[in-house]
Amino acid sequence: MCHLVPDLKKILCNIVSVKLSIMGCGVSNSQDTDSQAMSHSEKTIKSALLIQRWFRSYQARMETRRRCTWSIFQSIEYSGEQDQHNLYNFFNDMLLTLGGNDKSKVYAEGDKDDEDDELSEYVIDHSYDGPHPTFPLSHETMLDLIEAFKKKQVLHTKYVLKILKQMQELLKERPNISQATTAIAKQITVCGDLHGKIEDLFLIFYKNGIPSADNPYIFNGDFVDRGENSIEIAMLLFGFQIVYPNEVYINRGNHEDHIMNLRYGLIRELQVKYKSYTQVILKELAHVFGWLPIVTLIDKKILVCHGGVSDMTDLEYLSTIERQKYLSVLKPPLKDGSMSLEGIREEDIGDRIDLKEWRQVLDVLWSDPKPQPGCTPNKFRGGGCYFGPDVTKAILEKHNLKLLIRSHECKQNGYEYSHDGKVLTVFSASNYYEMGSNRGAYIKFGRDLKPHPVQYMYVASTSTRPLTARQNLSIIEESALRNVREKIIANKTVLLEAFKQSDPNETGFITQTQWAKAMSEGLHLDLPWLTIRNQLIKMNDDGRVEYVTCLQQEINFNGSRLNGPSFTEVIYRNKTALETIFRALDKDHSGCITMDEFSEGCKLLSQHLQTQMSDEVVSDMAKSLDINKDGQIDFNEFLEAFRLVDIQEKNLQKNQENLDKLKSHADLNQIANGDENQNSV
């Protein structure tokens, strides 16, 4: 810290010297003792004020950087969720069409065979070196499973399916609203989002104890996606609830949804770990997710739900809904029993969906609190609502409740109070955006029902020296800025056009306000652009932005053009959506699209776009994409289709430019010849 302020060491020495004099350690017989003491006192005060001023300035700068970094991470995360929500109609139709009508259909209820007969085909061979849990599950079995997962062992498909089927049968007997109590164990613990971060779950169990009859838990949704161990966390939570059905409670989150899983990692994780068995596991997971309770009440005084509430939330009505119908909350069932929105006009959707019922589920899983009163659509995420303190107060008073516990939002300290202490957000995944970006937390309740947050942060064992707070913030900040730069790359053409509108004279410079406005509108991200401008742009001596420097980020485009997006730009902008579409087309989740799967996907697209595609055209397209001629299309080959489209666009643009030149030349000849009636070429 001393190297940040010149002469700080000298100032500190002066303070120590003055203190020693005051304590009688200095020269007391000098005639100038009084004047020296006064002089030293003045120096002490000035030094203390200087240090105080510097320290406050330093803290303010650090806090500003933290808030900017946090704003970037959250804005980009919520932007992705909004994109997924906006695409749900298309994916509804895709999943319905690609699912087929056979018994292997992933997301529809089918006839259940005897469990033992159904699982008999999954043979455990001698090469399997993972855990062998015994059934019925016991506390000791779950401890063994924890140790196996700590060793990175993968549970066999047969055991996974057995746990999922038992969990489904257990949940079918449970109501939409679980009733938890502190009367027996005298305590209960609430955990928030874990998002596949199993190290945080292990840390919670280490600090707070393993779930048991004396140590009940509520897990408040979003335990899958994003992290690397979603299936292991699911197995542990489901297993403990099977062993302790009256002491372990699991609420559904917005990521316990197969449409979200397409994009955010669970399906990809299963493809790596379970290969050809991915589809059957997903089928059972989807059913379990659909049967998960929506809300838990603690002693009928504390409401625990994943997202929040709205002005429509009614717990009595919510308790009557057939929750299993909502296999995806983003795909509400239609009143006539069908699952597709195909052919339905947007203005008629309200007549085909039970909006009141759907909103009850959607708002509880997707909503966020806001400081302003009222209830407004949550356009930032694309689902649920923003609810104000007046809405919270009304819902709590209506149901005679004291507190709302929710998750759904990452918080820097792992938890955060809002709405005058009536809403408590808890988030249990530490290092969510980047290592060191946030703490995790869980909430302990005793018989008095007073919340006691417990914070933690998982730190991997390492031999390197620990980073200072400033170094750690710099790493997190750079990670956030890298995400912004990728967004800039993905929208380079759009941004350039916006910049040029503010620079009609083509000077190459615009004001900082114009730049910030163009960035906000072009990227659809509400960020403190003026605060982070120095990391993204160069300015001239007059403080005007040299906007081309904003577009010259880490990746240089090869063959990029000013009047249209380059291939690299198109891929960056659409990569996540393309990955999601690829996984939806990959019906058996093998990691490759077969010719039949590609054909089914093309038929769906032709129906969705109301165009006609012959079987011959589809077959030719598939063969063109199958570059290595192995009879299937991997993701890299799938992306190559967009390179071909990009090349075609370039050729069309070049042809158009040539035509424009010919037309211009013909017009000049026409004027030179004085023949105004001549037709242009």
Image (cartoon, rainbow, N blue to C red):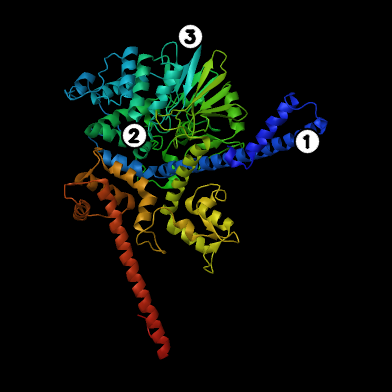
Q: Which residue is mark 3?
A: 184
Mark 3, secondary structure of its residue = loop
Residue drawn at x 55%, y 54% is 516
**Kind of residue sitting beneath label 1:** Ser
Residue drawn at x 55%, y 27% is 424
Mark 2, secondary structure of its residue = helix
**Picture layout, residue 91 above or below residue 454:** below
| Residue 226 at x, y percent in the picture | 38, 35
Q: Which residue is mark 2?
A: 266
User: Nearer the N terminus, badge 2 or badge 1?
Assistant: 1
Q: Residues within 10 Å of mark 3 (few under 14, many from 20)?
A: few
Q: Nearer the viewer, mark 3 or mark 2?
A: 2
Q: Residues within 10 Å of mark 1 (few under 14, many from 20)?
A: few
**Kind of residue sitting beneath label 2:** Leu
User: Nearer the N terminus, badge 3 or badge 2?
Assistant: 3
**Kind of residue sitting beneath label 3:** Ile
